[in-house]
Every structure is written in C-alpha cells, then in structure tokens.
Amino acid sequence: MPVDFFISPCSNVSGNCKKAGIVCKSLTNAVRFGISDKNANKREPAFIDTIDPTIWEVDINNPNGKDIIFKAVDYCVEIYRIGNYSLANASRDKIDFSVEDTDRLGKGLIKRCEGFLFYENNILFLELKLRRRGNWLSDAREKFEETILSFLQYYPPGTYRLLEPVVSNKTFTGTHQSEMVQKRIFKDKTGLDFHFKTSITIV
C-alpha cells in the first residue's frame, strides 16, 4: 500500500503515536517556536514546542506568522523497503529503491529523519542530532536519503516544492571532516544538497 506521509494520527503503534498526549502532526503560526526530539528514547516522535526554548533542537523563526505544519516521520510513518536498494552498496541506484507501508517481504523499516515542516506547498525535511562525535553526519545523510527517496516515490517532483533539508546539531561547532563526502553522496542519490543550521527563518 502507498505510504501516507501526512497521516494523523499515525499508524505506528510501536512508535506510541496513539498514546494519549502524543501529537505527530501539528500546526502553528507562532513567530518563534522550536522542534524537540526529547522523547526519542521513549520511541515517541519529535514535536513542535512554543513554550520552552531549552528543549528546542532547532529554532524556527516565523516573522510573518505563516501557518506551518510540523509532521513527524521517525516513530510515526511506517516505511518498509521492498526494493533492492542498500545503503551498504556504494554503487546503489535509486531505480532499485522502492517502499510501501507494510513489511510483507520482511525487509524491515528504512532509515527515517525526524520529520518535515510544511508551509505554502514547501516541504523542509529535518534531522535533529545532539552528538559531538561519531558517525552522526553519515547517519543524518542516510536518513535524509531514504526518507526523501520514499517521499518522491509517492509525491513526484512538482507535487510539492522540496526544499534542501536541514540537519541541526547544537552540540557541534566547526566543520565536520566528512561533510564534503556526505554532501556529494546525498547530491548523487537525491539531486539535493543539505545544510547545517540550528536556526531556520521562514520567509
């Protein structure tokens, strides 16, 4: 069956989306808000917060008060691989990428980023990290890669305006040693660049 990125409440029982108080899709027109993933260790999706900046992993400035939806993907949207696309294969071709919303072949879930902002037909995917060291950047790129290829399978180019995704890591400063490599891989697989930002302004 097709993957519905906008479904709410989401269908992922194991991701706790159906527990009381869990919101996987919300709308705000606040001039400043944040996205928090503080409950990821409970397998709960990221969410909008307008009250406590100390838990924001990315700051969103919305000076014109536009209506903005945040839709969680990780721990929310079930996306299972059915094609032969493998992140372990350096020569992988996106023609082999295919997913659906049930694990009928037993191949398991793809890697998914936290979610996306949706406003004025724009889609901006986000990945949130709080790590100074390790392979967090390659992990972010892989999550963007598979999430965006999944999105494009069901929402072809022209359906929405796909903005270049943002990875936010407030614990990291400087330039990551593998940044150029990761960006080159991502560009090759999706045609997009990605950016490092801890603050985003909606224009």
Image (tube, rainbow, N blue to C red):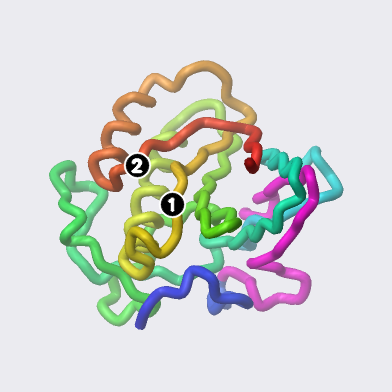
Residue 157, compared with residue 53, is above or below; it is: below
Residue 201, compared with residue 93, is above or below; it is: above
Residue 19, horizontal then vertical, whole percent:
71, 76
Q: Residue at x 26, y 77 (%)?
A: 105
Q: Which residue is drawn at 77% across and 71% down?
A: 21
Mark 1 lies on a secondary structure that is strand
Residue 45's image quarter? Answer: bottom right
User: The residue under label 1 is which amino acid type?
Assistant: Leu
What residue would you read off at disc 1? 162
Query: Is 75 positioned to the left or the right of 64 in the image?
Result: left
Per the rendered image, the range of residues in magenta is: 15-42
Residue 152's image quarter? Answer: bottom left
What residue would you read off at disc 2? 192
Q: How busy is the neighbourhood of tag 1: few (under 14 within 10 Å), some, or many (20 plus)?
A: some
Residue 77, horizontal then vertical, whole percent:
50, 69
Q: Say whether marks 2 and 1 touch (CB < 8 Å).
A: yes
Q: How busy is the neighbourhood of tag 2: few (under 14 within 10 Å), some, or many (20 plus)?
A: some
Q: Which of marks 2 and 1 is nearer the N terminus?
A: 1
Residue 61's image quarter? Answer: top right
